[in-house]
Amino acid sequence: MDLKPGVRLRSPVCEVEAIVIKAPPTSIDLRCGGHPMLAIDATPPAASTAEPGFDGGSALGKRYTDGEGTLEVLCTKPGPSSLSVGDKLLQIKEAKPLPSSD
Amino acid sequence: MHLAMLLQMAADGMSDRVAVGTLAAPMTMAELGEGSMRVGSFLAAQRGDRVGLIDLNSEAIPLTLFGAALAGKPFVPLNYRLTDDQLRSIVARIAPATIVVGEGIAARLGDLEDIVVVTRQELLAVARDAGQPLADPYGGDPESIAVLLYTSGTTGEPKAAVLRHRNLASYILSTVEFAGAAPDEAALVSVPPYHIAGLSAVLSSTYAGRRIVYAETFEPASWVSLVRSERVTHAMVVPTMLNRILDVVDVVDHGGLPSLRIVSYGGGPMPAEVIGRAMELLTGVDFVNAYGLTETSSTIALLGPEDHREAFASGDSAVRARLGSVGRPLPTVTVTIRGPGGEPLPTGQRGEIWVQGEQVSGEYLGAGAGAADGWFHTRDAGHLDQAGFLYVHGRLDDVIVRGGENLSPGEIEAVLVEHPAVLAAAVVGVPDTEWGEKVVAAVILADGAHASEDELRNFVRARLRSTKTPERIQVRAELPFNETGKLLRRVLREELAAAFVSPIAS
């Protein structure tokens, strides 16, 4: 699917929701629980479940990247399934904390 | 990303944390989320395209800010210290609108066309009313306008800076770790709600999960007592506030501020002696100098605690000088220094500070995008050093042009305040028949100190050159600052011109 910053997506298999922070101009096979993510207002198919290996969970407020710095999504609703591009799991982006300035 | 989503994440993920309030009267994140959704549906149903606010600080600030976001209407906090005429004129500009007002404001506004007034008490009642419908939790388009902020207008007609949801949300996402605050953290917010720092404090604290404690307005003794009674860990101050706080802690009661961990400051140049005094008096406190503008959604450069300690302890004058810098640009923004024709200047040279990044708006209402080429021209003078530290030298518009030579008031002011008798100094240019402009200064002397005009002029001449030496220096009891510590140079220029310029030259 074509992703651009600000696009919101939901998992087809659990409660996970995410928003795109950064995306490459090419089409991306973004998945949750091993299945393609859906538009935020789409109705998830009945009775699908996460594939083994894609059930590690997604944590609220964590940013996930593809490790190449081209894709970044923010988890806005947590759930038991994991985000991936194709079969490759996304990684939590460890942000270097800035001191609070306001 | 829309601000309503930041709130929703905080309300979902940190529901039991306290969002705002005192230890005795806390409002949780879940309550802030639900209250804002009630206020959102209420504001959506009101007349008008905008939501104004003219009030002191209270929990009505986050409720109205987020409520307006959920209602899909720009939030427009206004300066309650304006004169009645100025206030009415700005309110008329934002009509049709609903305006949340504090005590006594409705009477000051009188009847205005297409303006609906809601009191703070009425708004808080809406937020608590279980019968009020809830707005859709996820607001709308990230491109829509989140906030209109009328800039302080030190140079003339106020204009409204436009901050879109994506600008503010991108600032928060790139600077704040979600739920990153320790559970006992509390931020004391004493800057007014119509200041960008007052808004970014709400957004940062909510996303970090840090309790906001409001001071209705800044007063040094009550600020100190709030820090102690509310076990405040974080605070943001402008330079004039910090010195007055230190007076209370140092001179009046010696009580210290043991709960305090981080003090950030910004909003104007901080005299080196004030920050040095703060670092000596408030041991255990980390200091952060933040530089930013309304048009950049708050902070774009930071001098962090380590930078402070390193500079403070260093014998190397270049490192020591960093205490006078605003630190390094945030990793998510790009800062460059440009000449008058927009040409990039070499490291170390002074020019105009330009900035680029997702959080940068640079847009004014009715004037199109100011950052059309992707760069916001800040109109601040500055330079970058070899290590990437940014130094700000005041507004470009304040540069004095004397006989074709550009002089920076900040440089001359910095020398004047080094004189032991001088507490504060301001330098401006006034009309001059021979030179176009001439340099004049106003100083406030320390209690009981004396210095003649000639002595001060000689002091500057010995350190700078004669063209940078003020031709006249006025000793005064006070300087015209606005309430956020910004020197009103236009006012001072008029006053000094009246004192030092013969009628023919002006």
Image (cartoon, coloured by chain):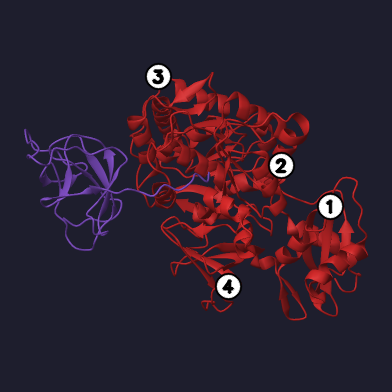
The colour assigned to chain B within the rendered structure:
red
Marks 3 and 4, how far apart in space? 60 Å
- Residue B348: which disc? 4
Indicate which disc, 3 or 4, sits on the residue closer to the N terminus.
3
- How packed mark 1 is, by other alpha carbons closer than 10 Å (few <14, some 14-19, many 20 or more), is some
Q: Is residue B197 above or below residue B14?
A: below
* Disc on res. B444: 1
Location of residue B398 (image quadrant) = bottom right
Q: Are marks 4 and 1 on the same chain?
A: yes
Q: Chain of mark 1?
A: B
Q: Colour of chain A?
A: purple
- Between residues B267 and B91, which one lies in front from this camera angle? B267
Give the CA distance from mark 2 to mark 4: 46 Å
Instruction: Name the chain letter of the residue that bears numbered label 2.
Output: B
Q: Is the residue at mark 1 from the same chain as the one at mark 2?
A: yes
* Mark 3 and mark 1 on one chain: yes
Q: For the residues marked 4 and 1, what is the alpha-carbon distance in whole angstroms?
A: 31 Å
Three-letter amino acid code at disc 2? Asp
- Residue picked out by circle 3: B130
- Please tell me the numbered disc located at residue B84: 2
User: Closer to the camera: disc 4 or disc 1?
Assistant: 4
User: Disc 1 vs disc 2: Cβ atoms closer than 8 Å?
Assistant: no
CA gap, disc 1 and disc 2: 31 Å
Comes first in the chain, label 3 or label 2: 2
Q: Quadrant of the N terminus of chain A?
A: bottom left
**Measured along the vertical axis of the image, is residue B303 above or below residue B473?**
above
